[in-house]
Each structure stands twice: as C-alpha cells, then as structure tokens.
Image (spheres, rainbow, N blue to C red):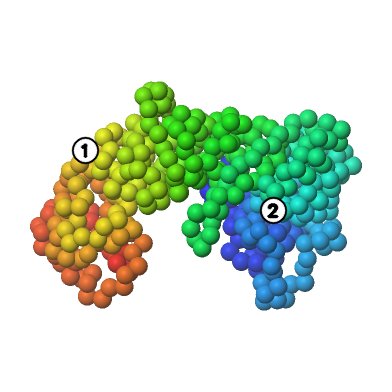
C-alpha cells in the first residue's frame, strides 16, 4: 500500500473484500486497486453511501480480467451499461483518478451520476491516440457535471502525435475549451526494459496549470522539464528519476522545485548519466539552498553512471542543507567520502557493494559515527556479510561506538538460507564477547527473522 496521499489509504486484500464492501461511515477515501473494473465495486450502491471524497489509483494499465473474473464467477465489464446499473456517486464532491487510460476516463465520467461533483482531478491519464480528447471535452460541462468548479488533468500522448496534436487541439483551444487554463510541453521519460531503466522516450504532457497541483498526485517525476513549468511541489513522497544533467545550475533549479516545499520522502534515482559539471557559480547556488521539511532521502545511483565525486557532492549538499532529515538510505562507497555531518539522522540504511572477510576493515564505524552521531537504527544490506569471527567483532564495534543505537539489522532482506545451528552459534559467540549491552537479555534480543538476516 502506498502512503502518499493526504488521507488514510486502504488497499483491499482481495476481490472478495471489494464485492462485500460495506463502509457505511466513510466520507473520505484514498484507495489503490489493480484493475479499472474494481471502481464499480467501490461505487456500488449502498457500499459507501456517504462518500464525498474519492482518490483512486489503478495499478494495472491494461484491463485483462478474464482469469481473475472467472475464478470468482464475475460477469462484469467496464462499460456504460454496467456502471449505470451498479453505481451511485450522487454524494461525491471530489474525484481524483490516477493512472487510467483516456478512453476509460471518458466512459466513467459519462456513465456516473455525479450531480454534486465540484472538483475533478485526472492524473497520469495515458492515450496512444487523440480520439478521446474531444469526447472528454464534451462531457466536462454543465450537462454532465452541473456543479463542477475545478478541473485539473494531466494526460500523456506519444511524441509522434505532436503535429496532429498541434493542429487539432492546440490551434483550436480558445474556440472549443470551456476552461482557460491549458498548457503543454515535451518531456523525456525513462522507460523500463527488462527491469532496467536504459531508454528514454519523449512524451507530450497536456495539462491544466498550475502543474504543481497535479504533480502532488503523480508517483514519478522525470528529468528536468517539469521544473520550468511548476512551482515548488508540496507532497508526502517524491520519486525523481533522472538520466540527464547538463550542469549543476539545472540540478539546483530542479532540487528547488522538488524539495524546498514540504516533502517527507525524497527518492533520487539516477540512470545512464552522460555528463555532470561542477563550477564555482553553481556551487555557490547550492550553498544557499535549504530543504527545511525533508525527513527521508533514498539515494539510488545506478552503478558507474556518474562520477563518484558527483554522487558524493549531491549527498553532501543534502546532508548539509536538511535540518530535519531523520532517515537516510545510501551506499557506503559514497557516504564514506562525504564530509558533511548531520546530527538529526536517526535511521540509516547502509547499502554495501563488497563482500569481505572482515567488515570492520570495509566499513569505518568510527567515521560513520563522526558523520552521523545520533543514529538509533542502523540497517546494512544488499551484499550479505559473512558469518565468521570478524562478523561478531564487527557487531561489538558497532554497539560500542554508536552509543544511541537501539536497533541493528545486518544482511537486511538477506536471501541466503542458513543451517538451523548457525543462529545458535552466532548468539553464543556474541554473548561470549562479554559486551555489557549485548549480554543483557533485558535490553538485547537477537533474532534471525528470515534466512540470514540478523536483528539485534
């Protein structure tokens, strides 16, 4: 379940739960479903009779429900007839739809009875043609939505439709569109191929401004073009994917848009970077940058796509500029070269890329403590540490050095099966060290929750 909206989200565990939905006291709801047809169960008559605010995300782009439906003997189609028969949206005042095809959006709006709807937000709506735009324009009016006051949408079209888009939509906007708040631009988006982000495609972003209103609801933001058209973004979680940095000024402007307003979790993912330039002018602009509300950062730099000095520079600046930062996920190879300390970080997820006999020689715990002296939770993962005598010494070194440590997790999400006697041997070796904090069973519990993951 995502945690990225302003209201508590619910994620039905199965289609059976959706079929039997009875939330009689719910007024505001944020929900994630797998397929578009599940919307019909949510808006089914008497299921949520007092619903006024609905924010729904559809995980699957394609509606392929045959086996899913057959399993539960469901005869259901996402069509105007079934929507009209099954649903009641008469109390709905705010509707937010995310990640749905353009044609299904028009079917849904045309079919739902929403006489009280005041705000409609459509985000990450995708289409491979321009056929459905005219229908959407026609149904967003007083006939279908008599009380509609606010309309925001963000629609993606493939870049190869640009000339047709310019001719049939842009050149006619003033004549045909009831709202005077439309804009568009071309964006380079990263595309996943075989679980690797190595390609870029160009997409037409067609939207109502201001763009930052819509970016509050998007999952992922790509590269830099949005920064030219958006004010600083206010949302709980932002995932920024980037494979283009021309200079540090560009990066600075993007960061200002992403993280200088309220943001709780900031995920940075850099892929296939071509170049990245530092200069005195750009560096001076970073010195004035502040991320006052940032609480959690996840750095994900694809291996060998950037100079390590550039990765370290970005990490250093964020550590220095984030007075409320409490949680950090970063590779040790990068963090060990940083110079900016941060006394507010309590939770560190450290990613290691090297398997070694003695982890103490690889991870300098003294320097780690110097950078982040107030860690209470330390997690180390990605490459598994070996269970040997040096492993136990490493645990003692961590416990003795990081004095505020409450929880230690080694080999986080480890995948290596271990023999049943290994946990017993490791615990005995830890107790044999005589370390007071580790020996005290009232404050220290040693567990192996799954495979070779160790928690203390």
Q: Nearer the viewer, residue 115 or 107?
A: 107
Residue 17 visible in image: yes
The residue drawn where x is 86% and y is 36% is 176
Quadrant of the rendered structure where residue 39 is?
A: bottom right
Relative to residue 79, is residue 381 drawn left or right?
A: left
Q: Is residue 86 above or below residue 295?
A: below
How far is the residue under mark 2 from the one under mark 1?
Answer: 48 Å
Between residue 453 and residue 101, name the one nearer to us. 101
Query: Which residue matches tag 1?
Result: 370
Question: Pointer 2: what residue?
Answer: 100
Visible residue check, residue 438:
no
The image shows residue 276 at horizontal and vertical percentages of 41, 37
User: What kind of element bears circle 2?
Assistant: strand
On the image, the x and y values in percent for residue 366 come to 17, 43
Q: Is residue 297 left or right of residue 24?
A: left
Q: Position of residue 303 (x, y in %)?
A: 37, 52
Q: Residues within 10 Å of mark 1 (few under 14, many from 20)?
A: some
Q: Residue at x 53, y 41 (%)?
A: 223
Q: In the rendered structure, find residue 10 and report the number of the disc placed on it.
A: none
The answer to the question of whether label 2 and label 1 lie on touching residues, with beta carbons closer than 8 A, is: no
């Amino acid at each position: 379940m995502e945690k990225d909206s302003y209201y508590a989200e619910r994620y039905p565990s199965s289609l059976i739960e959706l079929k039997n939905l009875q939330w009689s006291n719910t007024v505001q709801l944020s929900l994630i479903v797998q397929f578009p047809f599940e919307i019909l169960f949510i808006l089914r008559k008497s299921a949520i009779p007092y619903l006024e605010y609905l924010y729904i995300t559809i995980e699957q782009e394609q509606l392929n429900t045959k086996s899913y439906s057959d399993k539960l003997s469901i005869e259901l189609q996402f069509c105007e007839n079934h929507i009209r028969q099954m649903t009641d949206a008469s109390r709905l005042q705010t509707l937010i739809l995310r990640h749905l095809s353009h044609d299904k959006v028009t079917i849904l709006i045309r079919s739902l009875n929403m006489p009280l709807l005041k705000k409609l937000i459509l985000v990450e709506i995708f289409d491979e043609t321009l056929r459905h735009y005219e229908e959407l324009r026609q149904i967003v009016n007083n006939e279908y939505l008599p009380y509609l006051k606010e309309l925001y949408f963000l629609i993606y079209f493939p870049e190869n439709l640009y000339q047709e888009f310019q001719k049939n939509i842009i050149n006619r906007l003033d004549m045909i569109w009831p709202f005077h708040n439309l804009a568009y631009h071309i964006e380079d988006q990263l595309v996943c191929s075989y679980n690797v982000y190595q390609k870029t495609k160009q997409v037409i972003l067609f939207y109502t401004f201001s763009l930052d209103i819509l970016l509050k609801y998007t999952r992922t933001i790509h590269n830099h073009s949005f920064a030219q058209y958006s004010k600083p973004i206010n949302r709980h979680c932002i995932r920024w994917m980037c494979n283009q940095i021309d200079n540090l000024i560009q990066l600075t402007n993007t960061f200002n848009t992403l993280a200088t307003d309220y943001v709780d979790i900031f995920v940075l993912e850099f892929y296939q970077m071509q170049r990245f330039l530092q200069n005195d002018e750009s560096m001076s602009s970073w010195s004035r940058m502040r991320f006052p509300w940032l609480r959690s950062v996840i750095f994900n730099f694809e291996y060998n796509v950037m100079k390590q000095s550039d990765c370290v520079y970005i990490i250093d600046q964020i550590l220095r500029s984030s007075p409320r930062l409490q949680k950090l996920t970063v590779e040790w190879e990068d963090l060990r070269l940083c110079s900016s300390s941060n006394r507010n970080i309590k939770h560190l997820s450290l990613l290691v890329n090297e398997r070694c006999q003695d982890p103490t020689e690889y991870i300098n715990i003294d320097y780690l403590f110097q950078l982040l002296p107030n860690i209470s939770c330390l997690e180390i993962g990605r490459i598994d540490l070996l269970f040997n005598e040096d492993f136990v010494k490493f645990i003692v070194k961590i416990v003795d050095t990081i004095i505020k440590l409450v929880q230690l997790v080694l080999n986080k999400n480890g995948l290596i099966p271990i023999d049943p006697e290994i946990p017993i041997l490791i615990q005995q070796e830890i107790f044999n060290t005589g370390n007071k904090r580790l020996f005290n069973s009232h404050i220290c519990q040693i567990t192996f929750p799954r495979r070779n993951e160790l928690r203390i």
